[in-house]
Amino acid sequence: GLHIGVIGGGQLGQMLGLAGVAMGHRFTFLDPAMEPPAASVGRHLRAEFDDAEALERLAVECDLVTLEFENVPQASAERIAARNCLMPNPQALAVAQDRVEEKQFFEGLGLSVAPWVQVDSVRDIVQGVAHLGGASILKTRRFGYDGKGQVRLADPAHAAHEGGPGNPGEAASAWEALAGAPAVLEKMLEFEREVSIVAVRGRNGEARVYPLVTNEHRHGILWQTTAHTGDPLQADAERAARLVMDKLDYVGVLAIEFFVVDGRLVINEMAPRVHNSGHWSLGGARTSQFENHIRAVIGWPLGETDPLGEVAMLNLVGSLPDPAAVLAVPGTHWHDYGKTPRPGRKLGHVTVTAPDRNALESRLDRLRAMIRPPGE
Ligand code: ATP
Ligand code: MG
Ligand code: MG
């Protein structure tokens, strides 16, 4: 087996490790936390993500290096890449880390994104709100996740008389809420649903794509993913994923989130790593996203991505239900990351499979009666 270095040691690293150890590999996870989830499945190199000495060690001691944390500093990614193979590569990371770069990259490939403007001042917000029209959403360019680093601005036409964002005071408070960080302002889309695609590309350029899944968020945090085969937008999503991966010479698992507007895909963002909306594949697909990521970075043939029936996943956020009650529902699997509970924190997830959609819905009804959605 190989010694695989992973930047980041959260639950994504833990699940990568579980898949990789089963295939005969061993892991070192670089993570600043005291006892991150992945420490249970490999060696933990405790260091900050910009610790030059630790990065050097990771690069030299491991056969290859990958990541599960998308905000690896650019200098750190380049430091690793200069010494060893970093997959995905630093350029792919750079694009995914910055919402401006990312949107321009998508536009350059001819993929549609929500109307947006770059924001570097309160004035940009005021002008942007007027330019975009309707409700909008301000997002930091970097470091946002689970809806953090975002402020929603109401439609000025409705809100102006209440001192809404048509009013510079409102723009100023939105700018302050993000501590004046460089941002983007996007038009709030009235989407029919949110979907995402998880895809994987090997070292030889071979790619495979999981079924397009439908996601429901609560308070900016993923709550539920359902995977059905035969989504009418599968081919379009697949084309986008292959285009993105080929352009970036990407190796490993990549996820792309979309809004469905008027029956068409509008790209929201991508994640250069295994993704929460792919967790259903662990037990719900012929090969999990975690196993496929490991196979991809090693240069092994990729596994089949077909779902095993109708599949769904519910996130366990903030608190955990009784595992025995959850597992009493047929077709369920329990995943607990071993993290200390905190409001809004992802602590685990549950997957459920069923032979048909009706059975899946009734199993989900039972699960949703005992699992609290994010923020509730
Ligand atoms: P993640 O944890 O997925 O990385 P994030 O913090 O990067 O999330 P986004 O995915 O950009 O944030 O936004 C979080 C959620 O907010 C989206 O899944 C969607 O529900 C909603 N949202 C974001 N942008 C828009 C938009 N332009 N129009 C409508 N809803 C939006
Ligand atoms: Mg994001
Ligand atoms: Mg998102």
Image (cartoon, rainbow, N blue to C red):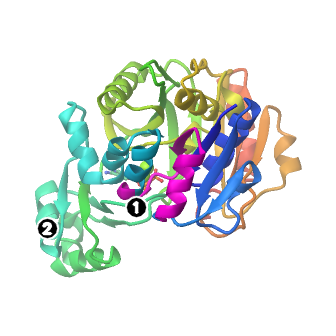
**Percent coordinates x, y for residue 362 in the rendering:** 72, 35
Label 2: few (<14), some (14–19) or many (≥20) C-alpha neighbours in 10 Å: some
Judge whether residue 203 is colored magenta: no
Which of the two residues, 158 or 21, is positioned nearer the viewer here? 21
Q: At 52% from the left edge and 48% from the top edge, which residue is drawn?
A: 59
* SS label for mark 2: helix
Left or right: residue 39 versus residue 117 is right
Q: At 32% from the left edge and 78% from the top edge, which residue is drawn?
A: 179
Judge whether residue 59 is colored magenta: yes
255 to 222, vertically: above or below: above
**Quadrant where the N terminus is found in the figure:** top right
Q: Looking at the image, is mark 2 or mark 1 nearer the viewer? A: 1
Which of the two residues, 211 or 1, is positioned nearer the viewer here? 1
Q: Residue under label 1, please give it.
A: 143
Q: Residue 346: in sight, yes or no?
A: no
The magenta segment: 51-75
> How many numbered marks does the figure carry?
2
From mark 2 to mark 1, how far is it between C-alphas?
Answer: 20 Å
**Quadrant where the C terminus is found in the figure:** bottom right
Q: Residue under label 2, please give it.
A: 124
Q: Tag 2: residue type?
A: Asp
